Amino acid sequence: MKFTKILSLAAISGLTVFALSCDNKSTETTEVEEIEEVVVEEAPNTVVDIAVGSPDHTTLVAAVSAAGLVETLSGDGPFTVFAPTNAAFSALPDGTVESLLLEENKDQLTAVLTYHVVAGNVLSGDLSDGQVVTTLQGQELTVSIKDGKVMINDATVVAADLSGSNGVVHVIDSVLLPK
């Protein structure tokens, strides 16, 4: 009989500890959920954030960083960015990207990158065949549209209208090189 009372007390104690620990876990879950809600309410992505969040644009992000353009392209804008993919950079002649990323070639890298940016928020629906747009670099890009395919100079737009808080990104399959 004594053994049964001890066993019953142990079981009740164990259940009490378990119940209390479950209650604490539910409080922890609530705190985690509150933190996640705060994270969701962060500011919208800039055009730079869009590129940073894309695994297909790591070379572009490295180049923008090396050129010191992150702060500029994270600014008010609006900017329209024609963003070459990693594959587009890989298609350049061997050594081109590595050479552009050298500190002594920062001006040339900046010129190439700003040749991919147009002032304003230009959505794909705003583009027309034969349209000419001036880049931040100062030279012009020509838009051509044929059979629903949009080209910027010789680059094909493969994804369009990725909207950010300070502009829009259009993904292209080639690196645009100024004259």
Image: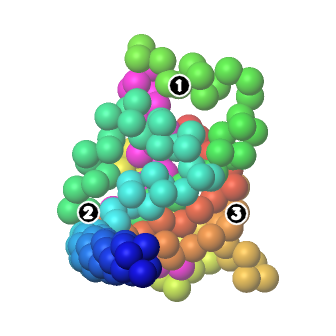
| Label 1 SS | helix
In percent of width and height, residue 174 lies at 68, 50
- The residue under label 1 is which amino acid type? Leu
Q: Which mark is residue 77?
A: 2
Q: Which residue is mark 3?
A: 156
Instruction: Identify the residue shown where x is 41% and y is 17%.
Output: 103
Question: For the magenta stretch, what is the residue range?
Answer: 105-124
Q: Is residue 25 visible?
A: no
Residue at the right extreme, as displayed: 147
Q: How far separated are the C-alphas under marks 3 and 1?
A: 23 Å
- The residue under label 2 is which amino acid type? Gly
For label 1, the crowd category at 10 Å Cα-Cα, with few meaning under 14, some 14 to 19 and many 20 or more, is some
Q: How far separated are the C-alphas under marks 1 and 2?
A: 25 Å
**Could you tell me if the residues under marks 3 and 2 are in contact, i.e. CB atoms within 8 Å?**
no
Q: Which of these two is toward me, 22 or 35? A: 22
The quarter of the rendered structure image containing the C terminus is top right
Q: Which of these two is toward me, 68 or 111? A: 68
| Label 3 SS | strand
In the rendered image, which quarter is residue 3 located in?
bottom left
Q: Which residue is mark 1?
A: 100
Instruction: Identify the residue shown where x is 59% and y is 62%.
Output: 171
| Label 2 SS | loop
Magenta residue check for 66: no
Q: Which mark is residue 112?
A: none
Instruction: Identify the residue shown where x is 32% and y is 44%.
Output: 70
In percent of width and height, residue 117 lies at 42, 55
For label 2, the crowd category at 10 Å Cα-Cα, with few meaning under 14, some 14 to 19 and many 20 or more, is some
Task: Tell me the colour scheme of the image.
Answer: rainbow
